[in-house]
Each structure stands twice: as C-alpha cells, then as structure tokens.
Image (cartoon, rainbow, N blue to C red):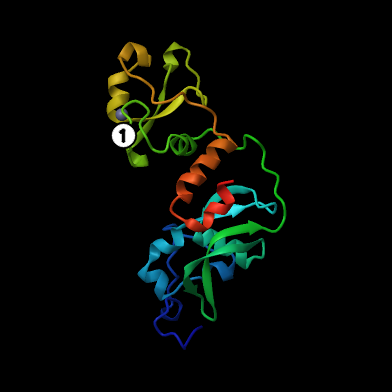
Amino acid sequence: MSARRPESWESRGRRAPDALGTASAGSESPAGSRVHNSIMMRRPSLMQEPVLVLNATYEPINVTAVRRAMVLLLKGVAQAEEMHNSEVHSAAHAHRVPSVIRLLAYRHIPQQSRALSRKNILLRDRNTCQFCGAVFASSELTLDHVVPRSRGGRSSWENLVACCYRCNNSKGDRTPEEAGLKLARRPRPFTLHTSRQLMRLIGHRDERWRKYLFY
Ligand SMILES: [Zn+2]
C-alpha cells in the first residue's frame, strides 16, 4: 500500500495498532483506522489525549479521545476549533491533532442522559473512595450501597458511591453512621453540571479549552 514508507505497519502486512488499546475490528471508517505513524508509535498516549467536544452552538457537551475526535473530523461530522501542536500521519496526509472540536449539526442532549453504571458512578466520584477520600484505580474500587440493600437501600445515584475494598469491608452491612464512617459528600445524580465540573477539571491542563469552559 505505501511502498514509500517501508517502516509503516501496513507495509509489513500488520494492522496499525489501535491507539485506545482495543481492537477496532474494522468498526471505524477506513480513513480513521489508517491514522497511524511513527509519531503515534513513539507517543501512543497522544491518541488518548482528551479532546473537548462542543455542540454546534459552541456549548461544551463531552470529552473524547484524540482518536475518536479525528474519526469525527474525517467523517465530516465535526470540525476542529483548536489544535494541538502535534501531528499524526496517514499514508498520504499529515493531520494536525485537535484539542477542541465542534459538531456541525446540533445534537439535543437530554438533561439526565447518563446511565446509572459503575463507570459513571466512578466518574462522578472521580475515582475517590467516598469514605476515606483516597484516589484509586478503577479496578481497586467497588460500589457501596450507602444504605445497605439488606436494609432497603436502593441502587440509585443517591445511594451508590465509589468505595475502596478496605472501607467496604469495614462498613459491612451497616449504615455509615453505624460504622463510624462519614461520606465525603452527598451522592447526587450525574447531571450536566457534574459533566461541566469534570470538563473544567480536565480543562485545567489545556489552555485552549478555557474560553469554551470558563464563562
Ligand atoms: Zn476507602
């Protein structure tokens, strides 16, 4: 395919490595899956850098990874508003890496579109055990029912919190009060407000996000 670039993955008959560490299995457009090169191999983390996604109205709505953002650009679904200083190369072109992209068609975002899931609870609680306040890898956290299920506690945004195994064990089948534990903060549903806070948190690392997030 690219005889000019004997160092490329494709010329060796191998798939380009998926930047997100997952097999893309041809699910993305050919253009998207061809986004690869020496820069990416030297800096595989570049493709996982966060990109701010704006609605057509410039309202910040999401954070995605560089790889996904570039697929949206190549498909013509979004346009780049701010760029990183880095580039990645496909067989024929150099692509500048976006930092902020904007959807070309307006997308309606329901107020509470976030599903109640382990992933979203950990995201809301920022991977912080809500009892001891320490930050853990996702694999080292479990979900705790603040009011235990055996006592009628429900699986809801208001009753589930991120919890380390140690605190989970010491709490057992008791309420926080009974176990002498105190919640770091009252658990709430994941709202657009929570999303904005998370975006701002991530955005502190990228100057280019500021004008869209701090207004
Ligand atoms: Zn803990």
**Count of numbered labels shown in the rendering:** 1
Residue 23 percent across, percent down from the top left: 46, 59
Q: Camera-side residue: 108 or 152?
A: 108
Quadrant for ligand 1 reads: top left
Horizontal relation, residue 141 to residue 13: left or right: left
Percent coordinates x, y for residue 111 in the rendering? 65, 35
Q: Secondary structure at mark 1?
A: loop
Q: Quadrant of residue 126?
A: top left
Q: Nearer the viewer, residue 210 or 8?
A: 210
Above or below, comparing residue 127 to residue 87 in the picture: above
Badge 1 residue CB within 8 Å of ligand 1 = yes
Q: Nearer the viewer, residue 71 or 132?
A: 132
Horizontal and vertical percent position of residue 56: 69, 54
Tag 1: amino acid: Ala
Residue at horizontal 59%, vertical 46%? 215
Image position of 72 with respect to 176: above or below: below
Judge from the rendering whether residue 184 lies leftward or rightward of residue 62; answer left or right: left
Tell me the residue that label 1 is attached to: 134
Residue at 53% x, 50% y is: 63
Question: As rendered, which of 31 and 199 lies closer to the eye?
Answer: 199
Rendering coords of residue 107 (x, y %): 70, 49
Q: Residue at x 53, y 73 (%)?
A: 95
